[in-house]
Image (cartoon, rainbow, N blue to C red):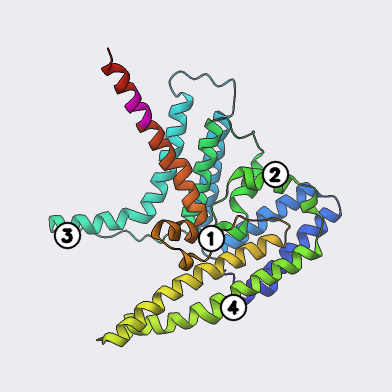
Amino acid sequence: MLFNSFTYMFAFLPVSVLGYFILNRLRLTLLSRVWLVVTSLLFYSCWNINYLPLLMGSILFNYLVLSLLSNKSYTNTIVTRKRLLIIGIAANVSLLGYYKYTNFFISSFNQLANSDIALLSLILPLGISFFTITQITFLVDCYEGLVKRTSLLNYFLFVTFFPHLIMGPILHHKDMMPQFDSLRAKIFSKQNLVSGLFLFSIGLIKKVGIADMFAIWANDGFDTARTLQLVEAWKTSLSYSLQLYFDFSGYSDMALGSSLMFNIKLPVNFNSPYKASNFIEFWQKWHISLTNFITTYLYSPILKYSANITFKRAMLSTY
């Protein structure tokens, strides 16, 4: 189910919003969270129900690791907390790598070794990058003691909340968990509903009115035309670039708008990257949540580790 489908716009989203606030109005707050989890899993199942067990299995596995990491009395001397974290991260990365890169490595090996190993019948599960990276950040922060222990239901809701599930942004617990717990978020807001509808409409225009138009010209150049002259080549390349731009921008706006109808504010994930003055600024504006993840959980730890190694070598050299 896509954000721009009639089923989503005129059935799924209105029913989800209505049911959520009716349950909260009746003070059935626990049931309202169950409602959001169930609707999110239904939203994911509409794409391919065969991958629903994969999503749920990933969540249950990570929650088990999180429970052990957050247990202050955990004293296993063989599988220490650090090793437990490594196991959790390795399992998540392996799952992501299996679906994304297995056939790539098989194809590369076939070309290098002149072999004929059959490719696997793999379909990349929708949103696997987003829900995998989201859970990795939770694991790391839990290991660092930055996360309070949460219930399985709240964790399910955090990971599966459908506005972000298939196209992002990558969520961080400190931004989202307090919003789910907030009493204000459980009270219907006409202002947020109107703002959400406005944002969603802007995103829909970008997706359907602009991106899909450029997609026709891009597909005509890449898939239909046998030869491309200078003008046709530029037209095809620019159409493809603008298709990607407005497609991602449109989906980002629709995700923000959908979430805002529930009084939940997702982090901004797209901020006019073509206005950037250099490539670094372009990347920071194109996929903001991914940039933050790379900076916080990859670049900074590597830089810190390198600095520690340099400092130790400098200290040893003095003796």
SS category of the residue bearing label 2: helix
Rendering coords of residue 85 (x, y %) = 47, 32
Q: Nearer the viewer, residue 270 or 22?
A: 270
Which residue sits at x=43%, y=28%? 83
Residue at mark 3 to residue at mark 2: CA–CA distance: 51 Å
The residue under label 2 is which amino acid type?
A: Pro
Specify the amino acid type for callout 1: Ile
- The quadrant the C terminus occupies is top left
- Looking at the image, is mark 4 or mark 1 earlier in the sequence? 1
Instruction: Give the crowd class for mark 1: few <14, some 14-19, many >=20 residues within 10 Å.
Output: many
Q: Measure the C-alpha gap from mark 3 to mark 4.
A: 44 Å
Residue occupied by mark 4: 205
Badge 3 vs badge 2, beta-carbon distance below 8 Å: no
Q: Earlier in the sequence, mark 1 or mark 3?
A: 3
Task: Count residues near mark 3 (Cα–Cα under 10 Å), then give few for <14, some for 14-19, many for 20+.
Answer: few
Gap in angstroms between the C-alphas marked 4 and 1: 19 Å
Q: Is residue 88 above or below residue 53?
A: above
